[in-house]
Image: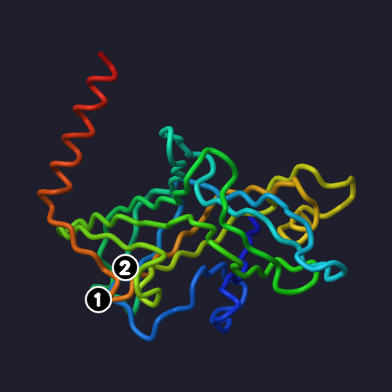
Amino acid sequence: MSYIRTHFSWPDYPARLAMLLVFFSMPASADFIATSTGPAGGLSYVGLGERMAGSNQGSGNFTYGFEDCMFDGVNTTCTVSGEYTESAGSNDPGATGSFVFRQIWTGDGVSPFIVESAEPFGNVVQGVTLGGATLEVDIFADDGRTFTGITPADPFANSAQFSFIGVIPGACTGLDAGVQCSLGQVGLVPGAMFTTDVDVFFITIPEAGIIPVPAAVWLFGSALGLLGWLRRKA
């Protein structure tokens, strides 16, 4: 099996880990660092064309969890979920639990989260704008800890970071015959699309960005959600 490992960073930050899709620069220290293998969810990248004419550097709308998106009449929420293990450098390496990640934006159209290739025809991409989208993750540790990380946070340095390894070859639509199916090529063609499954998902929440949530609140929220489902069912 082959994999895609593409670095992602905002232009204002230096590249920290080559060939890894990392959405935000890594902090000097972090309270929670975790890895999830085989989570439920994929990614999609819809081409917007060159950001600068003649550069051969494509751009596109990026969506985590595109296979599990719901529109509630106001916002679209796309989800990736799975089990995790805390990594080296985290507060409790080896600890386990589950997570639910959400990418949220207003409206029911294409994600406003825009990225672009860092070099001509490149699969290394960097953020252009979240476009009003937010990224959130809820952590449910097996030892009972429950907390949240968000992006963008205030201040931005407290934002959670998310990265992935995706399986390749991915699936492409909208490319001419014979053109390689890749992020770098799809970004050059408006309307073309690249999709793939997430094989490994990485989560980092800086210590200052952790938002503790009492377990009782999660239980209460779950009960309300179940009640709402039962009412809809009825």
Q: Is residue 211 left or right of residue 13?
A: left
**Above or below, 130 relative to 171:** below
> According to the image, label 2 marks what residue?
86
Does label 1 or label 2 sit earlier along the sequence?
A: 2
180 with respect to 193 (left or right): right
Q: How many marks?
A: 2
Q: Secondary structure at mark 2?
A: strand
Q: Which residue is mark 1?
A: 91
Residue 122 spot, x, y in % from top left: 74, 68
Residue 44 spot, x, y in % from top left: 61, 49
Residue at 65% x, 58% y is 2
What residue lies at 68% left-to-right and 56% top-to-bottom? 60
Q: Are marks 1 and 2 in contact (CB under 8 Å)?
A: yes
Which residue type does callout 2 highlight?
A: Glu
- State the CA–CA distance, disc 1 to disc 2: 8 Å
Residue at x 16%, y 35% (from the top left corner)? 223
